[in-house]
Image (cartoon, rainbow, N blue to C red):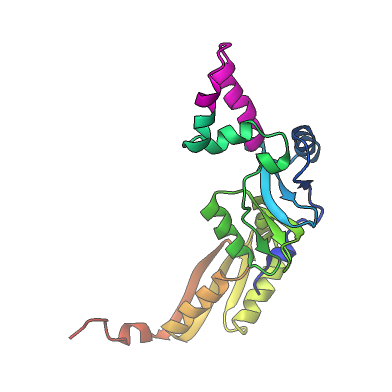
Amino acid sequence: MTSFVENVMTTDVAAVNEKASFHTVAELLISRGVSGVPVLDDDNRVLGVVSEADLLAKEEFKERYYGDDYRPPLRARVRHTAGSEGSGFRKSLGETAGALMTSPAHVITADTPIVSAARLMDRFGVKRLPVVDADGRLAGIVSRRDLIKAFLRPDKDIEQEVREALHGRAAVVVSDAVVTLSGTYAEHSQAVTAIRLAENIDGVVAVHDDLSWKHDDIADLPMWGGA
């Protein structure tokens, strides 16, 4: 059984309207103990995400350019908006969530498998993903910590699901989410399939293979590219 984002996401989401002030955003991050929140339009649609890093851009650029009481001319400051530091400099001038946010936001839907959500977080280098409905409205949020919940399934639940997936054709022992399979299959390929099925069960950390087989049908297969 595949777990989906809806099984682990948080629905009590800390979020801000795009018109929210810098101070409001900062207060929310601190009071809710989060490092970033979705930014919404007036119709509750996700526009972007504002994070601690976005807020800190203001202090970073203030220190960089004004730390020695030197204020560069306007022309020099505006040039940064077109350079590699443009995004950070733009955010340093921001006063609202809409001006501070990173946009567009990377979002997912509640029916996304948690494995896919983890891959998206890794690909985009983010710690959380807003969850939206079919109209793009905020439905929840899922974080890396939420995804780890999939590995907190009770051993007995994992064991039952593995047994069902293997139709009782192997002995199954689960300890701390590590599955050990033992028994004898008629064919080597059947044992390999059993291992793969167990590995794909949500919450399984690893599979230890103590299986044996009577006939090595895999060894009988012709080699690709053989004569």
Can the viewer see residue 110 in this picture? yes
Residue that lies at the very extreme toward the top in this rendered image: 69
Name the quarter where the N terminus is drawn: bottom right
The residue lying toward the viewer, choosing from 197 and 57, is 57
Q: Which corner quadrant of the image does residue 56 belong to? A: top right
Going 82% across and 53% down the picture, which residue do you hit? 12
Image: 206 above or below 126: below
Judge whether residue 64 is colored magenta: yes
Q: Residue 38 location in percent, x, y?
A: 72, 49
Q: Which residues are magenta?
A: 54-77
Q: Which corner quadrant of the image does residue 146 belong to? A: bottom right
Q: Residue 222 location in percent, x, y?
A: 27, 86
Q: Which corner quadrant of the image does residue 5 belong to? A: bottom right
Residue that lies at the very extreme toward the front in this rendered image: 75
Going 59% across and 49% down the picture, which residue do you hit? 126
**Count of numbered circles on the image:** 0
Image: 46 above or below 101: below
The residue lying toward the viewer, choosing from 183 and 37, is 37
Can the viewer see residue 154 in this picture? no
Going 80% across and 57% down the picture, which residue do you hit? 43
Q: Main secondary structure of the magenta part?
A: helix
Name the quarter where the C terminus is drawn: bottom left
